[in-house]
Amino acid sequence: MIEIKNMNFGYVPQRKIFDNLNLSLEAGHIYGLLGKNGVGKTTLLKIISGLRFCNSGTVSVFGMKPEQRNPEMLADIYFVTEEMDVPTVSVNEYVKIYAPFYPNFSISDFENYLRQFEIADMEQKLTKMSHGQKKKVLVSFALATNTKLLIMDEPTNGMDIPSKSTFRKVVASAITDDKAFIISTHQVRDLQNVIDAVLVLDNGKILLNADINTICDRLTFKVLSANEFEELSQQGKVLYSEDNIAGKVAVCTHIDDADDKFDMELLFCAAISAREKMHEIFAEKENGKSRFASEMETKLNN
């Protein structure tokens, strides 16, 4: 669905945001895009959707180049931005203006999502709504477009706790095998139970791109006693840890028969804290070696 190869981008020539970035995304997944402030998460989403153009390399969405802004491609992409600049129109008027751009828009889906978000007044002006209410309308509209690619940048910001729960339900119900959702967020606790694949953007490259099952096959998330922590640390299995009222909560290389629960926030901290080790664990194999090991061998030989 999305293929990015050797992409470079910078707002000024002296500072690259992306340095030979490679990324492949498939339909049927809800991707969580994670990264520190300023690493370029929103810029990446804009490049994918054709709102920014890369300096070099190639970007392909549905086999088309986003920078060409092909109407066929744009009709199958919807981008919910973090900054909301809504027109002075009612909810009904918004639908009448913008729905025609999306051939698969469903008014019944839209009304269903609004009901779940407890928004009943379709004649209310968007500009008169609270930040959270606007978000719920725009998310509902986005899901109702039924585009193959849905991009959302910090969609739960401004939502109250019940609304965040509803958000998870409607997003999970909307994904299908021919769609992909990309959700950029710092609110990882809000979205952990709906995301099924994780992207970590770091230092101009994709540090991690893996589905949850693969992550849990290769890592263990566990609360460790002092003795367990010392033993596993000596074995080099602890990638990241932090204090917890129950002991040390840690991300370790896979431990057989461990009764653990995936933690996306801990995963992100581990990825940033143990970059090289994460490369070794998740890199694809090349001739029996990890891609990371092969790259390091090539550098040493040169």
Image (cartoon, rainbow, N blue to C red):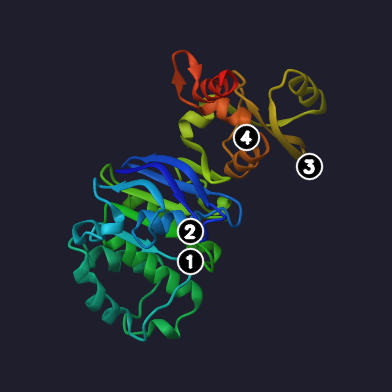
The label shown at residue 275 is 4
Q: Measured from the top left, where is residue 164 in percent x and y?
A: 50, 60
Q: CA distance from mark 3 to mark 4?
A: 27 Å
Q: Measured from the top left, where is residue 3 in percent x and y?
A: 34, 42
* Residue at which label 3 appears: 245
Nearer to us: label 2 or label 1: 2
- Residue 75, visible in the rendered structure: yes
Is disc 2 surrounded by few (<14), some (14 to 19) or many (20+) residues within 10 Å?
some
* Residue at which label 2 appears: 42
- Nearest the viewer among 183 and 243 is 183
* Residue 26 horizontal side relative to residue 210, left or right: left
* Residue at which label 1 appears: 82
Q: Residue furthest top?
A: 288
- Secondary structure found at label 2: helix
When the figure is inspected, residue 157 is found, relative to residue 298, above or below; the finding is below
Is there CB contact under 8 Å for labels 2 and 1?
A: yes
Is there CB contact under 8 Å for labels 4 and 2?
A: no
> Which comes before the other along the chain, label 4 or label 2?
2
When the figure is inspected, residue 230 is found, relative to residue 264, above or below; the finding is above
Residue name at image x 49 percent, y 79 percent? 130
Nearer to us: label 3 or label 1: 1
Dividing the image into 4 quarters, which one contains the C terminus?
top right
Is disc 3 surrounded by few (<14), some (14 to 19) or many (20+) residues within 10 Å?
few
